Image (tube, grey):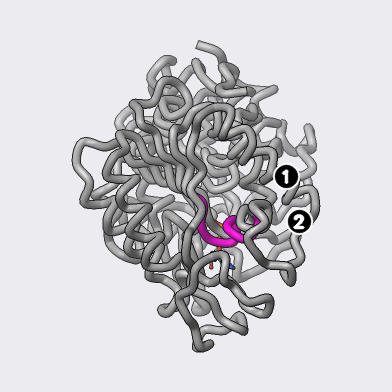
Amino acid sequence: MVNNLKNINKKTIQDININKKRILLRTDYNVPLDTNGNISDDIRIRESLPTLQYLIENECKIYICSHLGRPNGKIIKKLSLKPVCKRLSELLNKPINLLNMHNEITDTDTDTINMLENVRFNKEEEENNPNFARKLSNIADIFVNDAFGTAHRAHASTTGVTKFIPSVAGLLFSKEIKILNSLLDKPEKPFTAIIGGAKVSDKIGVLDNLINIAQNIIIGGGMAYTFIKAEKLILKNIDIADNEIKHAKYLIEKSKELNITINLPKDVIVTKEFQENAKFRNVASNNIKTNELIMDIGDESILKFKDILNNSKTILWNGPMGVFEWKNFSNGTYQLANHLSNLKNVTTVIGGGSTAEVFGKLNLENYISHISTGGGATLEFLEGKILPGYASLLNN
Ligand code: AMP
């Protein structure tokens, strides 16, 4: 499975008449909050502005709906959308009315933008309860889904409402689909995919699809364990699920058949404890001691990976090369991020999640062709899966 055509060719807000209509707009404002409850990265809010501006220009009455965190159907004060409402209001330079319960909604000024409180405060949301979806859809004439980051979830406010009112994609959603689709469908060659991070089980499925598309695959982060062990280099001590090792072995074999290069780090930074200030050393991957943990890629690997990137025309990156949150183990990730940002005439796509956070932290967001606002949704799209939040919209 390389590409799933069910993910493309849907109507957007530009394909229907939305003038002066009441719009239920699903956004993904699931933003990271710091310990004081302040938004630490507002990219998801900023990326929703083009759709909002388009709706405002068309004199729509807007009801924004989003979730934040995992309140599991309960009202949790610190997961209120209040800070999001405030930030969006600053960015739009317009007042926004935060509404506690959608069934309290009465007619408001056309000029006022409304935001429903965290939709996951209602347990019916994640159950995709049809009565709850109907209630939500009663607010509006048209549903606009701009929540790409939540498109892999079939919830009341992502797919449920589409059964009741005409439903189309917002501008961010359709931009994400277009760009990610172009990666799966005839990307300019050589195409290099960098895959790292911690959630190996989530990413191995992506590799199943990418192996049919990419010419080079670079493996780093926690993924490296699985592949290094599959290559029988070392790591007797690391407990990795047998099925993951088997899968990695299968991918290594398949890559040989397809003449694709899977590049593992030849050297790594290791420690004896998983700790920020742990003593570390740079060691060849086949010389790691049984009591050592991989924390980052090593100097030789960085050079080799940069060289591969220099010779690529399309680059997709999902998952950091090491525990980048800790200074001593951020070198591999930061060096590749800086390198990627300096490349010319290359399409560079960051597949959301913590890799997007890296580019935000380094202020490199403007040097990348596209930073996806999805994490899980991006991965599922790249796996070739149907995203229910997109499949349920009107066909074009
Ligand atoms: P993911 O969400 O799967 O992209 O994983 C991101 C997380 O992977 C980050 O928080 C990193 O600290 C973590 N990570 C990267 N490399 C390693 C590693 N070698 N061991 C443990 N965690 C890692």
In depth, the one of 82 and 177 nearer the eye is: 177
In depth, the one of 34 and 237 nearer the eye is: 237
Q: Where is residue 91 drawn, in percent x and y?
A: 31, 54
Q: Is residue 119 magenta?
A: no
**Residue plotted at (55% across, 24% down):** 141
> CB under 8 Å between callouts 1 and 2?
yes
Provide the residue span drawn in magenta. 219-226
Query: From mark 1 to mark 2, how far is it between C-alphas?
Result: 8 Å
Crowdedness near tag 2: few (<14), some (14–19) or many (≥20) residues, C-alpha within 10 Å: some
Which three-letter amino acid code belongs to the residue tagged 1?
A: Glu
Q: Which residue is mark 2?
A: 73
Q: Could you tell me which secondary element the residue under label 1 belongs to? A: helix
Relative to residue 130, is residue 289 drawn left or right?
Answer: left
**Residue plotted at (54% across, 59% down):** 81
Crowdedness near tag 1: few (<14), some (14–19) or many (≥20) residues, C-alpha within 10 Å: many
In this view, 271 is above or below 97: below
Q: Where is residue 142 drawn, in percent x and y?
A: 54, 25
Q: Where is residue 378 drawn, in percent x and y?
A: 53, 40
**Residue plotted at (61% across, 41% down):** 252
Which three-letter amino acid code belongs to the residue tagged 2?
A: Gly
Relative to residue 376, is residue 175 drawn left or right?
Answer: left
**Numbered tag placed on residue 125 in the rendering:** 1
> Which quadrant holds residue 51?
top left
Tell me which numbered mark, 1 or 2, is placed earlier along the sequence.
2
Figure quadrant of the N terminus? top right
Q: Is residue 220 magenta?
A: yes
Q: Quadrant holding ligand 1?
A: bottom right
Q: Where is residue 100 drawn, in percent x and y?
A: 61, 55
**Residue plotted at (71% across, 34% down):** 133
In this view, 157 is above or below 258: below
